Image (cartoon, rainbow, N blue to C red):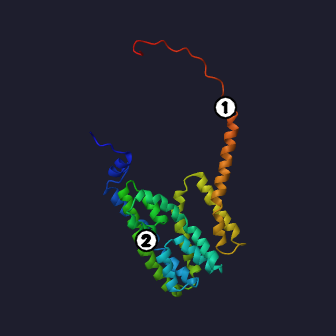
Amino acid sequence: MAEQRTPLQDLQDTGAPGTPPDGGPDAAAVRDALGVGTAVGLSGFAFGVTSAGAGLTLLQTCALSLLVFTGASQFALVGALAAGGNPFTAAAGAFFLGVRNAFYGLRLSQLLALPRPLRPLAAHWVIDETTAVTLSRPTRRSARIGFTVTGLTLYVLWNLTTLAGALGAKALGDTGAWGLDAASPAVFLALLAPMLRSTTERVAAGLAVLLVLGLLPVLPAGAPVLLSALAAPAVLFLGGRGTRRDADRTGGTTDTKPAPHTTPAPHTREDR
């Protein structure tokens, strides 16, 4: 008897339609992972400079990159401290930004299906960039390759450039004059924009931006980032209400007339 195979097994063996022929999905995973890891990893220099400018020591700056390793949260923390924010508020803002990685992990744990001993190590590399590369792969093998190469490349480069930035901060002088404080947010937005495919996602992101900009002048540093998270449930709630109103409006106009009676065709010998 022939072995029964699932569509997922066929996909993992053959790859998705449109897979590049030059080396297959594995080579494409390495190429994309190196590109993302290198491009984003170099922005660690901006973090090192910004962190040193905010008053953190070299050891504190490097420890953040080694142990936290989530760029947006790191920038949120040092940015709030540089603006004179309370350390607890700054830490809370960075924490809530990092919570998104836990949701990434729920999806990646099923997709990668790594051995149990490797999961704590892999969890440290669950960030925006590794998630984006991994989810775009057509097979489990290429997903694992993309995750590993992106994580390794980004982790090494991010920490090396953090060290270089922290050491060179004094030589650069005013970091704001160089615009380095905007490097990481720009990279983050460039990665986020293609992921906003639905109208709901775009509206939620736009509302979050408006909340941050509106609350910055009146709230302590770090607090606007926390409150901007309210944009998502607000948009979902309003969208749900709109859907229910549309359903109620169309529900009363549904055609309830019975179907016209039709005489069944006579049975033939073949029907019997």
Q: Quadrant of residue 89?
A: bottom right
Q: Is residue 3 visible?
A: yes
Assess whether mark 1 and mark 2 are in contact (beta carbons under 8 angstroms).
no
Callout 1 crowding tier (Cα within 10 Å): few <14, some 14–19, many ≥20? few
Residue located 27% across and 40% down the image: 2
- Residue 182 position within the rendered picture, expressed as x and y whole percent measured from the top left: 56, 73
Q: Is residue 229 left or right of residue 188?
A: right
Residue 130 spot, x, y in % from top left: 45, 64
Residue extending farthest right: 218
Q: Position of residue 202 (x, y in %)?
A: 60, 56
Amino acid type assigned to the residue bearing label 1 in the image:
Thr
Foreground residue, 140 or 191?
A: 140
Residue bearing mark 1? 254
Tag nearer the camera, 2 or 1: 1
Residue 37 in view in this figure: no
Badge 2 or badge 1: first in the primary sequence: 2
SS class, disc 1: loop
Residue at 35%, 49% in the rendered image: 9
Q: Residue at x 52, y 64 (%)?
A: 102
Q: Spot the residue most to the front.
A: 116
At x 57%, y 83%, the residue is: 53
- Quick check: 145 left or right of 247? left
Q: Amino acid type of disc 2?
A: Leu
Q: Is residue 1 above or below residue 105?
A: above
Q: Name above or below for residue 250 compared with residue 39.
A: above
Image: 91 above or below 143: below
Residue 154 marker: 2
